[in-house]
Image (tube, rainbow, N blue to C red):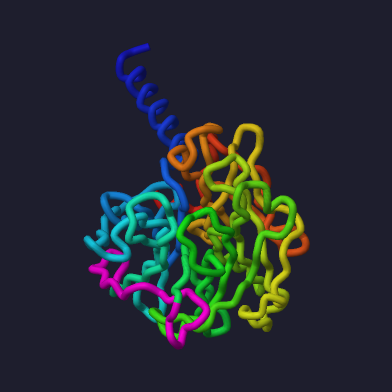
């Protein structure tokens, strides 16, 4: 074999290897927790606590970032100086909003978490701090604002609603049961009266020193509206997901009776995948596939510091419910449909 032919074969082999690598991605995507992704005008936006503040990413791809920037850093000596948890990014009437939880206290005990909102004209800011949401029972006087985390946005029939995990009353410690609440957004910074939407009542939702529902996320498919939520301790291998389904597109989301709770967990860990939860859902670049973006623990120990972010495809069953299947955990999977073509 002459040298020219040999070099050509080597180049062809290298090209084929690169092409094969381009068609797959490796889980976990990164270390982290409470992953959130939203798709807007052909771009994916993710957001997380990092770089000393809140970081936003933008990309044409679900499996990798193309632009990353810290868009906001907490102020000093304020209600939201510490414990920045579970930020989410949303678009309302052309403006960009970041929901997040923060605290006046650094670290435990985590009894001072409150929900806040930031506003900007584009996803990378600059963001204006629009303050703390009132998430208690008396929006008129705003008395006894309540603990609140994991706020998300439900847009339905021309109205905006906030859904979050909260406490029934004030406490000076953090071992308190967490329930899901919903309220209409009067404007992007103001909530109406909260409604208790759901609490952990089924056997598979209980078992830790507190009973909790958290990490609510909205999933829409055809005319169906779901709220997926997480339950059990996020620091344990028991973390798993449940589901609420709006009974009819015409139902009032503020009516707890308008929602049906799944009798069993809809996504849970295995012997090798140590809990799953706080997930968000989106579609592939060509909109032909649905994907779930979730966190899990790589080992049984390590608590919160051991969480990583994963991505996998899911479908819907004959009754219209999401079928998340079995978590793939650490794995190599085919990239979402349309990604390879975009990159080429």
Image location of residue 178, percent across then percent down: 57, 61
Instruction: Confirm whether the magenta stretch covers residue 269.
Output: no
Q: Is residue 105 visible?
A: yes
Instruction: Confirm whether the magenta stretch covers residue 126.
Output: yes
Front residue (pair 176, 248):
176
**Position of residue 251 in the picture relative to residue 158 (left or right):** right
Front residue (pair 13, 271):
271
Front residue (pair 104, 300):
104
**Position of residue 139 in the picture relative to residue 129 (left or right):** right
Q: Residue furthest top?
A: 1
Picture mark count: 0
Is 8 rendered above or below residue 88?
above
Image location of residue 142, percent across then percent down: 43, 81
Q: Quadrant of the N terminus?
A: top left
Q: Residue furthest front?
A: 172
Magenta range: 122-143
| Prevailing SS of the magenta stretch | loop
Q: Residue at image x 45%, y 62%? A: 38
Image location of residue 104, percent across then percent down: 32, 61
Image location of residue 116, percent across then percent down: 37, 69
Q: Residue at image x 35%, y 17%? A: 6
Is 1 rendered above or below residue 111?
above
Q: Residue furthest bottom?
A: 140
Q: Is residue 283 visible?
A: no
Is 259 rendered above or below residue 250?
above
Q: Residue at image x 46%, y 53%? A: 35
Give the image quarter of residue 219. Answer: bottom right
Q: Residue at image x 28%, y 64%? A: 124
């Amino acid at each position: 074999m002459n040298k020219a032919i040999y070099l050509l074969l080597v180049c062809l082999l290298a090209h084929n290897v690169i092409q094969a690598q381009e068609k797959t991605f490796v889980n976990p995507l990164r270390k982290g927790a409470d992953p959130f992704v939203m798709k807007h005008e052909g771009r994916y936006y993710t957001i997380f606590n990092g770089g000393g503040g809140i970081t936003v990413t933008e990309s044409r791809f679900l499996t990798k970032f193309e632009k990353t920037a810290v868009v906001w850093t907490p102020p000093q000596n304020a209600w939201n100086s510490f414990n920045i948890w579970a930020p989410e990014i949303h678009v309302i009437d052309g403006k960009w909003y970041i929901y997040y939880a923060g605290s006046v206290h650094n670290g435990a005990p985590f009894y001072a978490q409150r929900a806040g909102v930031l506003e900007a004209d584009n996803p990378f800011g600059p963001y204006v701090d629009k303050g703390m949401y009132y998430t208690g029972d008396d929006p008129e006087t705003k008395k006894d604002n309540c603990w609140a985390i994991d706020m998300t946005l439900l847009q339905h029939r021309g109205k905006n609603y906030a859904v979050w995990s909260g406490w029934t009353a004030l406490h000076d410690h953090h071992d308190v049961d967490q329930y899901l609440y919903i309220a209409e957004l009067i404007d992007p910074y103001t909530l109406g009266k909260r409604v208790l939407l759901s609490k952990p009542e089924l056997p598979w939702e209980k078992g830790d020193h507190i009973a909790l529902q958290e990490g609510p996320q909205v999933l829409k498919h055809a005319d169906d509206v779901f709220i997926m939520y997480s339950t059990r301790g996020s620091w344990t291998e028991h973390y798993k997901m449940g589901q609420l389904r709006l009974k009819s597109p015409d139902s009032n989301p503020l009516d707890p009776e308008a929602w049906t709770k799944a009798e069993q967990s809809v996504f849970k860990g295995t012997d090798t995948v140590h809990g799953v939860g706080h997930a968000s859902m989106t579609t592939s670049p060509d909109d032909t596939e649905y994907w779930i973006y979730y966190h899990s623990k790589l080992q049984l120990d390590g608590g919160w510091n051991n969480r990583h972010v994963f991505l996998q495809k899911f479908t819907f069953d004959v009754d219209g419910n999401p079928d998340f299947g079995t978590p793939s955990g650490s794995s190599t999977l085919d990239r979402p449909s349309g990604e390879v073509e975009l990159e080429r």
